[in-house]
């Protein structure tokens, strides 16, 4: 589905076009997005034209539409040149550890890089004493190539069987991250779950959405049967639940405060890298989807950050706020539109710290 809109400047010239690529928008969401443009009064829907603002929203669409959107010459694009470090599971961990090892240990599980060259040396039998580990393909997505091991021999046999197949050890699909498996987790409707957090990075500033989509496993959680992904993989159930609306039993304000502070540091990490726009683009931003786990003690753990960010049921709110925060300052609307304030700036983390302190004080009492 491709929608085109043209921006009309003060002289009546139509020369800016907004393009939204989507393979997951419902008719209702598409209609809402139409209204966002109509209320500005100087945008209109068109059949074609030069794309000046390119926005991508898709589930699993990078392979399908990546070349199409990368090749569009645009004034504003929601893609940043960053060598994919933020969506590389191990590179993000290493950058976080380099930035601050203490904070990395707080917000991410310990992990190791594994490939067909080093899998015998990096991982030891002692690592499996009272610990469970999860093996994930660094370049995999959508819950593919995930294996949970609570025995060293199971891990070793799995890797040995792959190494015997005479495969090319330098192929990207034979690179993994082995991370400590977080077994003691908070539950949603008796199931393990994760939060999909919208993260907007724009011109050196970061912000997160006020609402998070909940992904849940299919079956009730038990501390066993680790080969059963229906119990342990939180990407399998198509949940319609939203945090914090549907999670009254969780300390939602404390969890949100912790996630906001975590992304304050992630934004610092982003700013330490060589980020830039594509050559033909004068302005760029990107909306990522971060997967965050909540432990039984209601601490937050970052699992990964996805450049292919699926936000079903929230896309209209995200597009509305992206227009207000990113586009309207550059292409002013004829009719000023009030922001829905969906995104919260990470710099405002101090305003939310009281909820975390209040939670810990209540817990002590």
Image (cartoon, grey):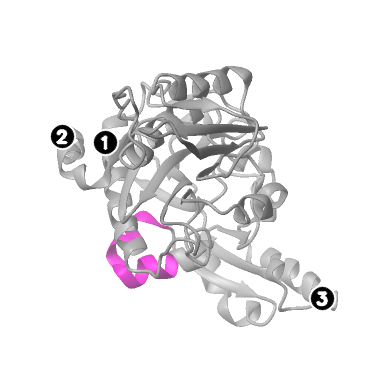
- What main secondary structure does the magenta stretch of the protein show? helix
Residue drawn where x is 47% and y is 64% of the image: 82
Q: Which residue is label 2 attached to? A: 358
Identify the disc placed on residue 254.
1
Q: CA distance from mark 3 to mark 2?
A: 54 Å
Q: Residue furthest right?
A: 165
* Disc 2, SS: helix
Give how far apart the Cα atoms at labels 1 and 3 are: 47 Å
Q: Position of residue 256 (x, y in %)?
A: 31, 37
Measured as percent of width and height from the top left, residue 113 is found at 55, 72
Whether pointer 1 and pointer 3 mark residues with C-beta atoms closer than 8 Å, the reply is no
Looking at the rendering, in which quadrant would you find the N terminus?
top right
State the residue at coordinates (44%, 58%): 109
Q: For mark 3, what is the residue?
A: 167
Horizontal placement of 180 versus 275: left or right?
right
> Does the image show residue 313?
no
Name the spot of residue 54 as percent of width and height, x first: 53, 44
């Amino acid at each position: 589905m491709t929608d085109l809109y043209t921006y009309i400047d003060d002289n009546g010239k139509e020369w800016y076009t907004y393009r939204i690529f989507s393979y997951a928008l419902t008719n209702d969401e598409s209609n809402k997005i139409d209204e966002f443009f109509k209320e500005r009064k100087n945008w209109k829907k068109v059949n074609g034209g030069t794309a000046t603002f390119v926005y991508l929203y898709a589930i699993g669409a990078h392979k399908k539409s990546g070349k199409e959107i990368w090749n569009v010459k645009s004034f504003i694009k929601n893609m940043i040149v960053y060598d994919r470090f933020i969506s590389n599971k191990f590179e993000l961990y290493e950058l976080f550890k380099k930035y601050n090892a203490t904070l990395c240990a707080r917000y991410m599980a310990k992990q190791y890089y594994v490939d067909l060259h080093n899998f015998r040396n990096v991982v030891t039998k002692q690592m499996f004493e009272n610990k469970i580990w999860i093996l994930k393909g660094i370049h995999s997505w959508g819950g593919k190539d995930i294996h949970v091991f609570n025995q060293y021999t199971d891990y070793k046999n799995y890797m040995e069987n792959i190494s015997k197949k005479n495969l090319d050890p330098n192929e990207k699909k034979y690179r993994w991250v082995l991370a400590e498996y977080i077994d003691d987790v908070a539950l949603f409707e008796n199931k393990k779950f994760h939060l999909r957090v919208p993260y907007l990075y724009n011109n050196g500033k970061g912000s997160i959405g006020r609402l998070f989509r909940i992904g849940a496993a299919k079956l009730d959680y038990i501390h066993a049967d680790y080969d059963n992904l229906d119990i342990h993989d939180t990407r399998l159930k198509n949940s319609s639940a939203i945090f914090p609306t549907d999670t009254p039993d969780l300390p939602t304000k404390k969890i949100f405060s912790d996630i906001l502070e975590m992304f304050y540091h992630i934004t610092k990490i982003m700013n330490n890298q060589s980020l830039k726009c594509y050559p033909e683009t004068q302005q760029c931003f990107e909306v990522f989807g971060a997967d965050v786990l909540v432990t039984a003690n209601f601490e937050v753990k970052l699992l990964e950050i996805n450049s292919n960010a699926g936000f079903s049921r929230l896309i209209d709110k995200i597009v509305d706020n992206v227009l207000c925060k990113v586009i309207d300052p550059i292409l002013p609307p004829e009719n000023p539109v009030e922001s829905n304030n969906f995104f919260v700036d990470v710099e405002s983390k101090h305003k939310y710290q009281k909820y975390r302190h209040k939670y810990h004080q209540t817990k002590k009492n």
